[in-house]
Image (cartoon, rainbow, N blue to C red):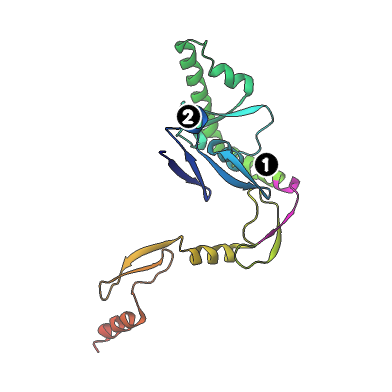
Amino acid sequence: MQRETTTYNGCKFHRYPDAKRESDRRYFKGWVEIEGKWTKITLHRYMWLVERGPIPEGYHVHHVDGDYSNNTIDNLALLSAGEHESLHSENASEDVKKKRTQALRDNSDKAAEWHHSEEGRKWHSQNSKKQMAEREFKTYTCQCCGKEFRSRSIQGGKFCGNSCKSKWRRDQGLDNVERVCAECGSKFVVNRYSKQKYCSRSCASKHRRSLRGV
């Protein structure tokens, strides 16, 4: 079966264009850790949780332009279940649907502009701090060093600190890139954040000697 995959916030999401179930054809879905519990969730709902906050009970996250693959936060809108069902109602005429979609798009554009404004950024900062303060601490085990630590993260704690997170990524080779040695021309693999230009110490030494004319 054909599968499409996308990655967001370090998590993989899949959808299946040939699946029998409509939701499997439409939506990218994946398993994420939220408050210490692994949960299967659609990409657009998870994106809203991460970037906008909790979804009130009885509310849906709607794709404004009707393209279920366009999972950008500015293309998402929070609607009550009734509003969402009304928007997708088969009884509505195409003209009504277009007007509703255009209204949502206009509102979404205005919302995006506000969220990027100084006032919007200030609101997000305050809201984020408020939500964080209200969350309970939970105990997790660092995937790198194995030590236990406490965190309020909505995504679930994976690492006790940035140093362990960076070490884990280096060990997994997630940030590796291929470069060409500035001395011998051989290809070598190195972390993309490294300033290394040579494939080995011998090549680095040889280059330094050449600069001294030795």
Give x and y (percent) for residue 127: 67, 41
**44 left or right of 6 in image:** right
Q: Residue at x 59, y 43 (%)?
A: 50
Residue carrying label 1 = 127
Residue carrying label 2 = 20
Q: Residue at x 42, y 32 (%)?
A: 18
Q: In the image, what residue type sits under mark 2?
A: Lys
**Real-space CA distance between mark 2 and mark 1, rounded to the nearest whole angstrom:** 40 Å
| Quarter of the figure with residue 4 | top left
Q: Dividing the image into 4 quarters, which one contains the N terminus?
A: top left
The front one of 210 and 73 is: 73
Reply yes or no: does residue 80 show up in magenta.
no
Depicted 15 relative to depicted 62: above or below = below
Give x and y (percent) for residue 69: 45, 34
Magenta-highlighted residues: 132-141
Say which element carries label 1. helix
Marked residue nearer the N-terminal end (2 or 1):
2
The front one of 95 and 174 is: 174
Q: Residue at x 45, y 11 (%)?
A: 95
Q: Callout 2: 10 Å neighbours few (<14), some, many (20+)?
A: few
Q: Residue at x 49, y 12 (%)?
A: 96
Give x and y (percent) for residue 208: 31, 83
Depicted 94 relative to depicted 42: above or below = above
Res. 57 visible in picture: yes
Q: Residue furthest bottom?
A: 214
**117 left or right of 175 in image:** right
Res. 118 visible in picture: no
Q: In the image, what residue type sits under mark 1?
A: Asn
Say which element carries label 2. loop
Give x and y (percent) for residue 22: 50, 27
